[in-house]
Image (cartoon, coloured by chain):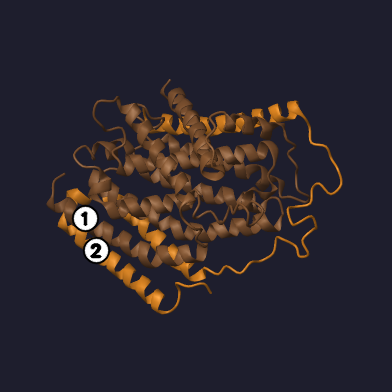
Amino acid sequence: MNELAQYAILFGLTVGVLGFVLSLHALARAIGRTRVEPGKDVPATSGTLSRDPVWVRYHARYGGYALLFLAFDMEMAFMYPWSVVYRAEGLVALLDMGVFLAVLFLGLLYGWSQGALRRQ
Amino acid sequence: MTILIVLLSLAAGAYFLAVIERWAVHGHLSLSGPAWAALALLGRESVLARKPDRLFFETGPVLLLVAGLMAAAVIPLAPGLIITDLATGALFLNAALAYVLVALIMAGWGPNGAYSMIAGWRFLGQFIAYAMLIVMPITAVAMRAESLSTTVIVTSQAQLWNALYQPIGFVLFVIAAIGLAWLPPLDLPDATGELAGGVEAEYTGVRLAVLRLGRLVVILALAGATVTFYLGGWLGPWLPPAAWSAIKTLIVAALMLSAGRYLPRIREERYLALSWKLGVSLALANIFLVGVIALVVPI
């Protein structure tokens, strides 16, 4: 099976899931429809509408982690091709990536010492 | 044909997981329980919250199901019994599981309710905690197998399972998988009894049924990934290969589900601190250790 056919299968599965969910909705609708009644559509906040609007800006208290996560996630993009040819390249590959990882790990330690790894 | 077999076994596995989850939450074992619960969900009204983001609200559960299915598509049950044996299977699994986060944020944002919104943001915090510990251990697995194809990864463990070859990576991966599937003790984003059900708070009827099914498929895909990467996949004596995959996957999934019965919940802030201070350091050490072992020992 070539790659194009494999991705075609995956796309077909996605469309199939959509069809499955739509038929479930149709089945539920055949069993009974939702009755529109006042007060039923209030979100789950103990029966009253929430005082403040919900779609506002929130304080992300994990900002330090998030920045470190970006750095490490980029690093992983390099790690995957490296890991496949690792055994073929041998010691050179270990040293190359070892230096890179050591620099990143020092970055993690520095961030830790500056208080990036705590709730802000 | 193989696709149909894999899909049917996925459905059977999801049903078994529903039975186990029922036992883990309510404490009694009932084989027909999930079927009645699903029928009841279909029969209930599916209420739409006022002023929702309709697109996000409808897409969330479907996207979760799609993400779980895409992840399961690259997991081999036996030689040849796999939906798509992609050359980049391990990477594709990561990409598919990343959409679990997107689906949950959509489902949290969509209904315009305070509790589900908070739950969605909590899961974003949890994502930053578990994401590196899913990705890094898989790198070490690929280093040993010299390939990202999941079938090659399984055959690379013929002499020694990766759970013994790289035990640090195994433990980190399983804990991160529990966080990814927001299972107890890491289930504060979903938070039964804390945020009125969290992301599930505004979902009722058929939409809730799809959301729960999607989550079961994600758990199953994660258990399958654990078996493929660390427990030798279909390898085993006496029994046919597919039976070994099924047994191992269901045992891992049952263990993941029952962990919450014995452990207290962990806040996402504490989980973040633990996984970045201890987890990432251990994962880097694991990559280095596997690197040295892979060069010295030729298995």
Look at mark 1 in the image and give the residue it sits on: B291
On the image, which quarter does residue B64 sit in?
top right
Q: CA distance from mark 1 to mark 2?
A: 10 Å
The quadrant of the rendering that contains the N terminus of chain B is top left
Q: Colour of chain B?
A: brown
**Disc 2: host chain:** A
Of badges 1 and 2, nearer the viewer stands 1
Q: Is residue B167 above or below residue A23?
A: below
On the image, which quarter does residue A93 sit in?
bottom left
Q: Is residue B243 above or below residue B123?
A: above
Q: Residue furthest top?
A: B1
Point out residue B80 in the picture as x, y percentages from the top left corner. 33, 26
Look at mark 2 in the image and give the residue it sits on: A98
Question: Dot 2: few (<14), some (14–19), or many (≥20) neighbours within 10 Å?
Answer: some
For image coordinates 74% across by 27% down, the residue present is: A31
**Disc 1: host chain:** B
Report helix, strand or loop for mark 1: helix
Point out residue B291 in the picture as x, y percentages from the top left corner. 21, 55
Q: Residue furthest front?
A: B28
- Examine the rendering and report whether any part of residue B159 can be seen: yes
- Depth check: give the residue in front, B30 or B21: B30
Q: Which amino acid lies under the numbered mark 2 shown in the image of this protein?
A: Gly
Q: Residue furthest right?
A: A38
Q: Give the left or right position of residue B294, taking residue B18 as reference.
A: left
Q: Which amino acid lies under the numbered mark 1 shown in the image of this protein?
A: Gly
Q: Are marks 1 and 2 on the same chain?
A: no
- Depth check: give the residue in front, A4 or B67: B67
Point out residue A52 in the picture as x, y percentages from the top left corner. 76, 65
